[in-house]
Image (cartoon, grey):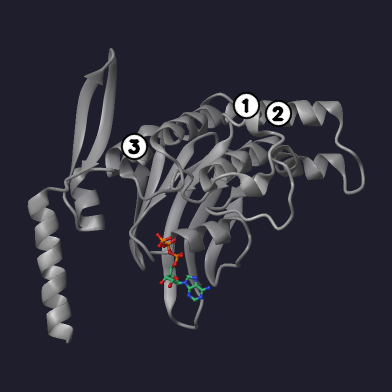
Amino acid sequence: MSDTAISISDLGYFYRPDVWVLRHCEARVARGGVFAILGPNGRGKTTLLHLLIGASKPREGSLAVRGRIAFVPQLFEASFDYTALDMALMGRARKIGLFSQPSRADVEATLSALDRFGMADFAERPFGELSGGQRQLVIFARALVAEADILVLDEPTSALDLENQALVLERIAALAREDGLTVVMTTHQPHHALAVADDALLMRGEGDYLAGKARDILTEESLRSLYRAPLKRLAFEHEGVEVETIAPILTPTRRANIRSQTATKAEGAA
Ligand SMILES: Nc1ncnc2c1ncn2[C@@H]1O[C@H](COP(=O)(O)OP(=O)(O)OP(=O)(O)O)[C@@H](O)[C@H]1O
């Protein structure tokens, strides 16, 4: 079997004719790895995910996806009052069939998936009564029981507190390293990408992409120019483990500068 899960070749997309959101995008997602997509707001990350899952068709270039995808969107609303367990069990729909009841094995596999995301105790709670972050964790479990080859996650940590961010990042790494799944995720947190991603794609603007090993391309220089904000890549030892992270530099002076620039712009516009 090929070691490439997704090949992206000269990919282009627009919503309105000739207003390209994405153009000449090239990347390769390795099978069994974590691939992080980063870029400022509006650079086309979600658009690229929609192309990967087949919700939109390329206007230009091509994509080859080898394997079945499960998609976890950023926000998930349910229209009916299913329990968390019902919601996660829907991931088994392909296995169970439309009019059949889930087997004991289906329920056990789903409870175990809920447990992996710290949600076993919430199995009987109405999904609609869970917090946004708790719903997100249930939807991860649903994607897991779908037994897909590729998980596509849109900002998987954005609704989560620090403890659950760490849990989900640890699970993402384990899904790739232990279960052999391929994970594609968008993120606004370069330190999350550095912590779990093997490879990354920096979406710098239409026609301007940088793809490569996460450790090699998530540099201070590339991220400073990507986000136009200072940050520092740090390496240190914590509890006997070498840790590498990326910290944004938000000093009071910088915040004051941003505020005064915003005020000057507003005065200029008035
Ligand atoms: N349905 C749509 N119709 C027209 N334009 C759209 C549509 N969806 C997105 N766009 C535009 O496409 C561009 C890319 O949007 P996209 O949501 O892919 O960016 P993103 O990188 O995911 O942003 P964010 O980080 O803010 O989530 C933006 O300029 C956006 O305004």
At horizontal 73% and vertical 28% (from top left) the residue drawn is 109
Q: Which residue is mark 2?
A: 111
Of 226 and 262, nearer the camera is: 262
Q: Residue furthest left?
A: 253
Q: Would you place residue 226 above or below residue 21 in this image?
A: above
Of 70 and 208, nearer the camera is: 70
Disc 1 packing (10 Å; few <14; some 14–19; many ≥20) = some
Spot occupied by residue 48 in the image (x, y as percentages of width and height): 50, 60
Q: Earlier in the sequence, mark 3 or mark 2?
A: 2
The three-letter code of the residue at mark 3 reads Leu
The answer to whether the residues at label 3 and label 2 have Cβ atoms under 8 Å apart is no
Spot occupied by residue 255 in the image (x, y as percentages of width and height): 14, 56
Residue 148 visible? The answer is no
The three-letter code of the residue at mark 2 reads Leu
Where residue 4 sits, quadrant-wise, is top right
Of 97 and 25, nearer the camera is: 97
Q: Earlier in the sequence, mark 3 or mark 1?
A: 1
Quadrant of the snapshot with the N terminus: top right
Where residue 52 sits, quadrant-wise, is bottom right
* Residue 226: mark: none
Separation of disc 3 and disc 1 at Cα?
Answer: 26 Å
The answer to whether the residues at label 1 and label 2 have Cβ atoms under 8 Å apart is yes
Q: Is residue 181 left or right of residue 169?
A: right
* Residue 194: mark: 3
